[in-house]
Image (tube, grey):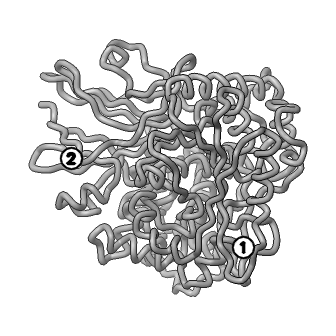
Amino acid sequence: VSTIPLDAAQVATELEEFLRAQFPATTVDLRRDVDLFESGVVDSVGVAETLAHIEELYGVEVPDDVLLSDDFTTVDGMARCIVELRARAIAP
Amino acid sequence: VVPSFRVIGRTGPCFGWDGSSVVQALPGDDDLRGDARPVVEGAFAGVGRSGDRTWLARDPLGLGKLFWAASNGDIDVASHPARLVERGHALDDCTALPANVVVTYEDGAGSPTVRPMVDPVGGEPDVTESVEGLAARIRATVDGYVGGLLAARPGPVIVCLSGGLDSTSVAALARAQRDDVVAITFDLARPGSRRRSEDFLAAHDAARHLGLDVVPAIHSPERLFELLDTVLVAGIDWRDFNVSIAELVGSPAEATILTGDLVNELLADYHSETYEGRTYYRLPRLPIAATRAALVRGLATSHREIGVFGAFGLPVVQPYAAARDAFLRLPDDVLGPGPGKARLYRAMFGGDLPDASYERPKTRAQTGSAVGERGVLAACADAGFDERRFARRFAELHGVDDIGALTRFLRAGRYRSGVPLK
């Protein structure tokens, strides 16, 4: 795991790019505050792909309590979760 | 203070395996004392009290289901969230007990003790154990499991048979133990056509090879649709055609129903289906090991076999659950829809199964044929049943008008889960 702290805005930008590339057929306006699950952008298969991407790129595993949190529903919220999980992982 | 647990309705059946015998009751109080953990595979979830202890437990794969909701300081527990909703709880207040956990509450103690039922299999596959060695371990486990099970349950034995490797092998295991095993095989009635699905025909061939009587279960689409509410509630799922109404079959009381379920997840040999230009059952675009992990993880959600049969009072047993550990140690080249599965099964069963079973391409129960007729999937799609409609109905049946409550309840193959901590 990298020991470099992450920047939430940077992570949000990257995540948005990933989601646009991964789910190009979505007709939803993919703003960063859109609920990705309620809007149907990400389904149960898509979230498995998203979790794998997060794990590979940021070196963090998303635990169930974070996965099912209200925060982990939007691009901005996911970015905050990833930053927090990375901070926890590199804390002394 | 230990919360008081109130069980609403009945918890699901217990079909565990402790490595040498079938466990038809949840781990006893003695098993939960001290440091020794009960190593129990299979399917179970429940709550028990003995002396000054109360415990909750759920099997390693999460095949058994248990939900809870707080009620004025006490805890209501049920096998289905709908039971909790009937008691006045909101779906947003219903939480699943996590899979692979034993929680013990002791009078006078502070927080409960939370322990895994088994250590998760992780890291690289064990290179010291060959595919043939693992195959032998799986075969020995399921032989022992089915033998112990059928010795303990003298009632009728019914195998849900599609003619594929998974169900045919389970039929062979049962047939080795008992002479009175009956196969039941499903097909969808097609108006104006007497043509049967590939599954139906293959099941008859396999049954003939094994010397089993076959009971055909042929239902009209309309009859299946009548049962949709039951399937949604009992299956605790609404996702894209995951409602396996094809598996709804009638059978006598006190029967033991055996299925070949779980191997598709444990080997990740699913593929997507296309009907009328639309793709169903899409798989994640991930390396095969990660796809398998996602599919296995998803077993903790959806109760589409055990739960749905249970709604009709029929106990379903999935023998391959007992061999979870060996399956998860198989290397990547055995996984996926390629030839690895046939290699594994030949190592497990050799000439015990008909040759045609090894050569038959994977067919989903919801389609019944690799090409041509598209079975229940097509019937649902033609009648306008899609995931959105299932979701709306699931929400209605659980007292919810906000579909968002569903994505807060089930996400990424996980129910909202946690341990009651009061």
Rendered location of residue B52, percent (x, y):
17, 20
Check the image and report above or below for B400 versus B44: below
B197 or B418: nearer the viewer? B197
Inspect this view and state whether residue B379 appears: yes
Check the image and report above or below for B315 versus A6: above
Q: Amino acid at mark 2?
A: Asp
Image point (84%, 56%), residue name: B361
The quarter of the rendered structure image containing the C terminus of chain B is top left
Inspect this view and state whether residue A13 appears: no
- How many C-alpha atoms fall within 10 Å of the one at disc 2: few (<14), some, or many (≥20)? many
Q: Secondary structure at mark 2?
A: strand
- Along the horizontal axis of the image, is A55 left or right of B351? left
Identify the chain of the residue marked 2, using the numbered disc in the image. Answer: B
Rendered location of residue B113, percent (x, y):
30, 26
- Along the horizontal axis of the image, is B181 left or right of B309? right
The residue that mark 2 highlights is B76
The quadrant in which residue B207 appears is top right
Q: Secondary structure at mark 1?
A: loop
B326 or B351: nearer the viewer? B351
Q: Amino acid at mark 1?
A: Arg
The numbered mark at residue B374 is: 1
- How many C-alpha atoms fall within 10 Å of the one at disc 1: few (<14), some, or many (≥20)? many
The quadrant in which residue B258 appears is top right
